[in-house]
Amino acid sequence: MTPRSTWHPWAMLAPTLALLVVFFLVPIGVAAFESVFAWDLLTPPRFVGAANYAAIAAHGQLLRTALRTLEYSVFVVAGTMSLGLGLALLVNRPGRFFAFVRASVFSAYVVSWVAVALLWMGLLERGGRSLLGDPRWALPALAFVGVWKLTGYAMIVFLAGLQGVPRSLLEAAALDGAGAWGRLRHVTLPLLAPTAAFVATTTLVTSFQAFDVVRIMTQGGPARATELFVYAIYEQIFLDLSVGRASALTVVFFGMLLALSALQLRAWGVRAGVRAGVKAGAGR
Amino acid sequence: MSSARLRTAWPGLAAAAAAAAWMVPYAWMVSTAFKTLPEIVAHPAAPFPERLDLGAYREVFAAMPVARYLAVTVGMAGTIAASQIALALPAGYALAKLRFVGARFAFGTVLACLLVPAQATFVPVFLMFAKARMVDTMAALVLPFASSAFGTFLVRQALVSVPDEIIEAARMDGASEWTIVYRILGPMLRPTLVSLFLVSFVFHYNDYFWPLVMTTGDRVRTLPLGVALLREQGTGVRWHIVMAGNVVLSAPVIALFAVAQRHLLRAVRA
C-alpha cells in the first residue's frame, strides 16, 4: 500500500531501528574496534594490533574454550533431541494425565536458569562433595542440567510437528500392513526430519551461549573444566579488566555463532518448505 | 501383571516415570525449604521435613529485600514486554503493508539483529553505558531490549496476512495511521501480542545474565540475582535457605504458566 505521507514509514520504524542498531549492530563494530587496543578501563587505551588475538589464542587456550563449548552444546543437543522426541511420541495421547505429564516436563523450560542451576547444585551435593568438583564430571553434569531444562521445549516442538503428520498417511501405511514400528520408521520420522533440524539448530545456538549454569554452578572450574565461551568473555572483562581481550574473544565468539546460525537458517528454510509441501499435499 | 495388560499400560507407566523425573526435583526443593539447619545436617537425604518450618523463608526475607527485588524485576520485565509490543506494531505495519524506498534495507536490518544475541554485545554495551555513567540504572536493564527484532519480525509476519481492504476502509473512514495501528490492527493481532508479551515477560523476569553484567550494586538488583547471591553468601550446607529463595523466585512464573499455558505454548510452537 502507498503510505499517506513519504515520512510515515520511517517515523514508524525509527524507534525500532534506532534501538536495534545502537544495541545490536553498533556493538559488534565497537567490539571489533576495541579488540585491537589494550585497555584496562583505568589507564588510556593503547593500540596493539593483533596482540589481543595472539594472547587469547596462546597455549591453545581459545581452541580449548571453543571445543569445550561445542562439546557441551553437542551433549545438550543430543540429549534434548532424543528425550524430547521420545517424550513427544509417548505423551501424544489424549487425557488429563498426559496433559499433566506434558506440563511437568515443559515447566522446567519456564522457570529461571537460576532456579534450575541452584536446584541441581543442591541435588548433586552430598555430604559437602559434588560431581561439580570433579574435573571429569563437571562438564557432563552441567550438560545434564541443560538437557533437563530444555527437553520440554524440544518435546513441545516435536508435538507440534506430530500434528503435521497427516492421519491419512498413517492409515494408508497401516492398510499396507505396516506395524506401529514400521509406521514410525517409514512415515512419522521422515516427516519429522525438518522439525528435528529446527530443534537441533535452535538448541545448538542456545547452548553455545550458555552462561548462567557456569556462573552459578562452577565459575568455570574445577581447573577450567567448565569454562565455556561466554563465561571466558565475562572473566576477561569483569575479573581481569581486559577490555581488549574480552573484545577479541567477543569477535571470535560472534563469528562462530554466525556459522552456527547459517546452519539454523538453512534448517528453517527446509522446515518452511516441507510444511508448505505437506499442506499442499493434504489439500489435494 | 499379564503381558497383555503390560502392553496397554506401558505408555502410562513410562509417562509417569517422566513426570517424576521433573516433579521429584521440585518436590525436593519445596521440601528442603521447610527443613531446619540441624535437620539438613543430620539427615541430608530425608525426603520429608519433620514439620513445616518457615524459618528458611524468614531468613530469605531477612537476607534480602524480597518485595523491592520483585518490584524491580516485574517492573523491568513488564516495561520491556510492553515497549516491545508498542514499538513492534508500527514497525511491523510499515514493513508488512507500506511500500517505500528502503523497505528491503529496513527489513534486512531487523533480520540481521535476529542473529546477534546479548551475549555477543554485552562487552561493548557495558562500555557504552559506563561512558554514559548509566551502569546500575533501570535504563541499562530496559533500553537494550525496549525493541525486539524477533517481536518486530513476528508482528510483521502476522500483519502480512491481514487484507489491505481493512486498512483502506479505515483510511476512507478518516482513521489516522495511529488509530489504524493501535486501535484496529492491534486488537486483530491480540493472540500473537499476548503470546509475545508473556514470552518476553517470562524471559526477562527469569534473566540472570543481563542484570548481572549491567549492575554493580544493590540499586536495581533483580530477584534472580538476589536468589543466586543467597548461595554465594551461604557458608556450607544452608540449602534450605537457597531452596526457599528458589521457591519465591519460581512461584510467580509457575503460577503464570498454570494460568496462561495456552499462550506460552503457542509462542513456542510458532
Image (cartoon, coloured by chain):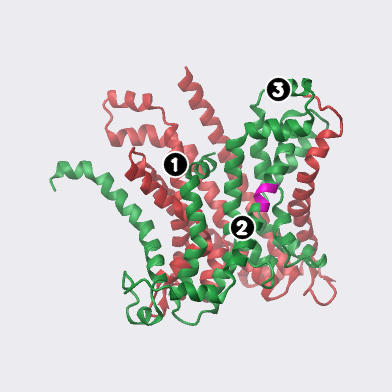
As drawn, A21 above or below B30: above
Name the dominant secondary structure of the magenta segment: helix
Q: Verify whether residue B82 appears in magenta.
A: yes
Specify the amino acid type for callout 2. Answer: Val
B173 relative position to A253: left or right: right
Q: Residue under label 2, please give it.
A: B74
- Quarter occupied by residue A145: bottom left
Bin the neighbour count of mark 2 within 10 Å (Cα to Cα): few under 14, some 14-19, many 20 and up: some
Secondary structure beneath dot 3 equals helix
Q: Nearer the viewer, mark 2 or mark 3?
A: 2
Q: Is B225 one of the magenta-colored residues?
A: no
Q: Which chain is red?
A: A
In space, the residues marked 2 and 3 are separated at their CA atoms by 38 Å
Answer whether labels 2 and 3 touch (C-beta < 8 Å): no
Question: In the rendering, which numbered label is found on residue A158?
Answer: 1
Q: Nearer the viewer, mark 3 or mark 1?
A: 3
Q: Start and end of the magenta stretch?
A: B79-83
Q: Where is residue A10 in the image (x, y as percent from the top left)?
A: 82, 37
Identify the residue at horizontal 37%, vertical 78% (top origin).
Answer: B40
- Across and down, in percent, residue B119 comes to 65, 59
Q: Name the residue under label 3.
A: B164
- x, y (%) of residue B238? 45, 78
Which chain is home to disc 1? Answer: A
User: Within the image, what quadrant is residue B140 found in?
Assistant: bottom right
- For chain B, give the colour: green
